[in-house]
Image: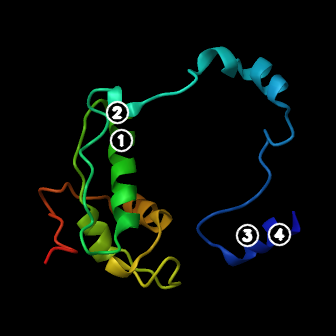
Amino acid sequence: MEKLYGYNKAMSTRFSGQGALATMTRSSLASDVELEAALPESVDWRKRDNILTPVKSQGACGSCWAVAATEAIESNIAIETGKLLSLSPQGLTSCVSNPRRCGGDGGCQGATSEMAFNHTMRHGIAEIWQYPYVSGVT
């Protein structure tokens, strides 16, 4: 717990701590929430219609953090709404600052998906037709 308190002092975008389910056994959790019967053993999202966009190429750019975040957001929107959008990793690559240099210096030099998610929650995200991907293209 001391380690978690240390994280909380240093971080402003998240809070670390022990959740309410941490002390429950698997069997008590399953009986309380009936998870064992409700969840399938596995899910292959590739076999579901309109959940995944085609894999995007980051080219010669270290924007994996932006591409991964964009594809995760696209799929979450599709699962929730049934509408599959193709979103712009370029908007994140161009606009997300990385002052702590966590994962790199930002843009094609790298950042983290957490930064991409935080930026998207604050500012939204464009569709790829509005802001095409040009980073890493020679």
Q: Amino acid at mark 3?
A: Asn
- Badge 3: residue crowd in 10 Å (few <14, some 14–19, many ≥20): some
At horizontal 82% and vertical 23% (from top left) the residue drawn is: 27
At horizontal 80% and vertical 52% (from top left) the residue drawn is: 18
Residue underneath mark 2: 46
Closer to us: 9 or 57: 57
- x and y percent of residue 76 in the render? 39, 41
Please report whichever mark, 4 or 2, sits nearer to the chain's N-terminal start: 4
Q: Amino acid at mark 1?
A: Ser
Closest to the camera, between mark 2 and mark 3, is 2
Please report whichever mark, 3 or 1, sits nearer to the chain's N-terminal start: 3
Q: Amino acid at mark 2?
A: Arg
Closest to the camera, between mark 3 and mark 1, is 1
Secondary structure state at the residue bearing disc 4? helix
Query: Alpha carbon of mark 4 to alpha carbon of mark 1: how far?
Result: 34 Å
Q: Is residue 29 left or right of residue 122?
A: right
Secondary structure state at the residue bearing disc 3? helix
Q: Quadrant location of the C terminus?
A: bottom left
Query: Alpha carbon of mark 3 to alpha carbon of mark 1: how far?
Result: 30 Å
**Residue 75 tag number:** 1
Query: Alpha carbon of mark 2 to alpha carbon of mark 3: how far?
Result: 37 Å
- Badge 4: residue crowd in 10 Å (few <14, some 14–19, many ≥20): few
Closest to the camera, between mark 4 and mark 3, is 4
Residue underneath mark 3: 8
**CB under 8 Å between callouts 4 and 1?**
no
- x and y percent of residue 4 in the render? 79, 65
Please report whichever mark, 4 or 1, sits nearer to the chain's N-terminal start: 4
Residue underneath mark 4: 3
